[in-house]
Image (tube, coloured by chain):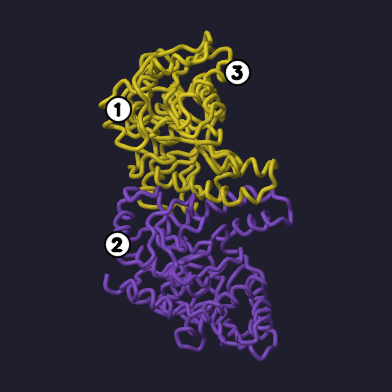
Chain colours: A purple, B yellow
Amino acid sequence: MHVRIALDVMGGDRAPASCLTGAALAVAQDEALTVLLVGPKTVLAEAPEHPRLLAIPSGPGVPEGGQPAAYLRAHPDASMAVAVGLVADKEAEAAVSVGHTGALMIAARWRLGTVPGVSRPAPAAVFPLGSQPVVLDIGANVDVAKRDYLAFAALGRAFAKAVKGVAAPRVALLANGAERGKGTKVLREAYTLLETRVPDFVGYLEPVEMFTGAADVLVADGFLGNIVLKTMEGVAQTLLPLAPPGDHLADLLARASDITGSGSPLLLLGTEGVVVPGHGRAHAADIARLIALAARAVRGGLLPTVHEAAAEIGLAEV
Amino acid sequence: MHVRIALDVMGGDRAPASCLTGAALAVAQDEALTVLLVGPKTVLAEAPEHPRLLAIPSGPGVPEGGQPAAYLRAHPDASMAVAVGLVADKEAEAAVSVGHTGALMIAARWRLGTVPGVSRPAPAAVFPLGSQPVVLDIGANVDVAKRDYLAFAALGRAFAKAVKGVAAPRVALLANGAERGKGTKVLREAYTLLETRVPDFVGYLEPVEMFTGAADVLVADGFLGNIVLKTMEGVAQTLLPLAPPGDHLADLLARASDITGSGSPLLLLGTEGVVVPGHGRAHAADIARLIALAARAVRGGLLPTVHEAAAEIGLAEV
């Protein structure tokens, strides 16, 4: 399946060189891939020549810091907004940007809209240890309602099916104990809702069990998901200098030390298109990897799988 | 300084043998230590003979599961209640029990009362990685108010001073970002309160920074603290089989895999006495270690330091 990926070439600390080189690497590695390079004309003039690298002129990149919503309103031609717009206009099947993640979420909501029943799109990641669970929300939505947990369950199931190839992903709510009396008030309400609606719901899971394979998808609000992610990173960063260099353990610790830069699948879910964020520190090889992830998500049918999962759970009716 | 420790000999899966042997080990290792063995007469009849092991008859141990408060009401002579009562009656300076932790917290509140200004006593632990921060609450109080964070700050400072010997412990609130706009509503309220009242308050700290030494005391509600603890344990348990056996890294991973059984200092804080809980799986050597921790906390002046820290912060006036 030939896939077209729109790349914001202005995203990240090393842009545009990292993005232009990364795109060239990606098309060299995948013959059924076209990358639409989105950036100012002067930048695109420096792009490598390749029949499957297409130049799409846009305005500037979104600066780090500041108010991303205000910036995007004032600059509707910002490179990441145009990249996402190409997905909305069916010119590309997915958009990749390692620019401002908050801005990318806003641009994705505005240009693509949300999947019916999803009020809060969420970033999701595969945690690269043990059974490699899909975890979401890893940081966007701090205050959530019980129905958001239901949406996260649908989105996480679609991620596990389409990107990881899990046929019937088991879903758990991350909590401080396995018994259903545990958790906060909203978690207990979410438990009751997920129990009646989510196929293969396994109840609460404590983070100590998170890598054992007891669940494929771990659902949390963006505060908790972010805390769990950063705890994993902190533990791994502390232990990494002690691991024998080059060892498998050192490799795992390095990956768990930096989830957004680790090469683990990371997706924004819940908007009507495939959107891949990444860390601003990304090098060219990381950009190529993110483009390949976007292509894999498209070929795995992520968006139709999201719709199926949402329909199966009856998201739009809750 | 001669110290008397009351030991609930009926606590834990291996009781009473683990406790009786552990007490004998402890007094052999510390000549300025007396252990008051608390348990039914028939059990105490089996205790090792030693001039600094004293038998204090009591009722049975508190069973695991069930309703601990109801059990303690029906059995005021339960071994852990009598052990804590010896502290209340100044017959001992500290109590140790690896029985039901929830029951121990209740018994401690009832028999000892709480420190003025502390409405929720909290379990606290040293996390055994990197800078080895004191973390609390690690699991007891799921729904807390902003003033509870202030109490946890005072209790954590006292722990770091009296047990770890940190002269001016820096306190942070665990959160999902360093900027003060981060966190939940109650965390932002707590930030404002701690900022005005807690000496050496350093603001929010993300768990990724938790072992870097940026703070000595990490304050969280019992839900979040428990999640962070169990995430650390889950990461360590997943990596432990991959570490070279006998290596320093393997040792660290083993300790981080099981905080209550690791030998890291673990205390119940906020009641008017020194109370040391522990894991029910404790062997005799673990019991000896917990007794030694209790003696260290007494000799370090934990309880007067808690009072000083509470006064310094003005806990009783908030």
Disc 1, SS: helix
Same chain? Circles 2 and 1: no
Q: Locate residue A79, reporting x and y percent.
A: 53, 79
Amino acid type of disc 1? Leu
Q: Is residue B162 visible?
A: no
Counting residues from the N terminus, which is met first, the one under dot 1 or under dot 3?
3
Which numbered disc covers residue B29?
Answer: 3
Residue, x 67% and y 81% (percent of image)? A29
In the image: residue A18, left or right of residue B184: right
- How many residues crowd around disc 3 within 10 Å: few (fewer than 14), some, or many (20 or more)? few
Amino acid bearing label 2: Leu
For disc 2, the marked residue is A193
Q: Quadrant of residue B87?
A: top left
Crowd around label 1: few <14 · some 14–19 · many ≥20 (10 Å): many
**Disc 1 is attached to a residue of which chain?**
B
Q: Residue at x 46, y 69 (%)?
A: A68
Give percent across and percent down for residue A106.
43, 72
Q: Position of residue A168 (x, y in %)?
A: 44, 69
**Amino acid type shown at disc 3:** Gln
